[in-house]
Image (cartoon, grey):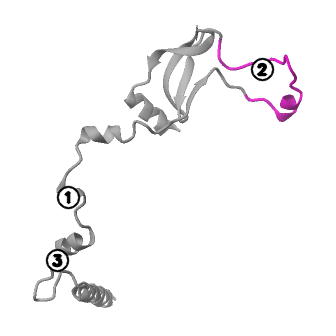
Amino acid sequence: MSENNGQGQDEIADEWAAALAEQETPSAPAGGTVSAADTTAALFPQLSGGKTIQANNDIEMILDIPVQLTVELGRTRIPIKHILQLAQGSVIELDALAGEPMDVLVNGCLIAQGEVVVVNDKFGIRLTDIVTPSERMRRLNRH
């Protein structure tokens, strides 16, 4: 059985070699065989005239992408029947304690914590703790 497998694999390899030999590439040698490097060069021509993009320019490409920033005061779970009973003036108890730092999330990922401030009659948040990149990765792996 192993002989048959060996012959089958050899036949498949021969078919691939024949298919590669049939490809017309400008860099194909006179013998008709095409190397992997020649095939790669033909299929994927070099982009941008051989210039490489510097790493510091990569960050500039994403700076204008909008993200969803959320400041979370707290959470709770309540049954639908209680939601249907809510009216103006109803109070919903949250799991956060008064004076506790609020979570700042970007696209649902915790990046910082802070405290509420009022500036020119508008609410804001003063960041008190930034989550380190390693801590963010640890939190992502937990979920």
The answer to which quarter of the image holds residue 101 is top right
Question: What is the spatial separation of the Cα atoms under label 1 and label 3, in whole angstroms?
Answer: 23 Å
Going from N to C along the chain, the mark reached first, 2 or 1, is 1
The residue to which callout 1 is attached is 49
Q: Is residue 27 left or right of residue 62?
A: left
Q: Residue flagged by tag 2: what amino acid is it?
A: Ile
Residue mark closest to the camera, 2 vs 1 = 1
Q: What amino acid is found at the position of numbered circle 1 in the picture?
A: Gly
The kind of secondary structure element at disc 3 is loop
Q: Main secondary structure of the magenta part?
A: loop
Please tell me the numbered disc located at residue 92: 2
Read off the magenta span.
77-97
On the image, which quarter does residue 90 sit in? Answer: top right
Q: Is residue 91 magenta?
A: yes
In the picture provided, is 14 more to the left or to the right than 60?
A: left
Badge 3 is on which residue? Answer: 35
Q: What is the crowding at mark 2: few (fewer than 14 residues within 10 Å), some, or many (at least 20)?
A: few
- Relative image position of residue 30 (x, y in whole percent): 10, 88
Image height of 6 relative to 71, above or below: below
**Which label is found at residue 25?**
none
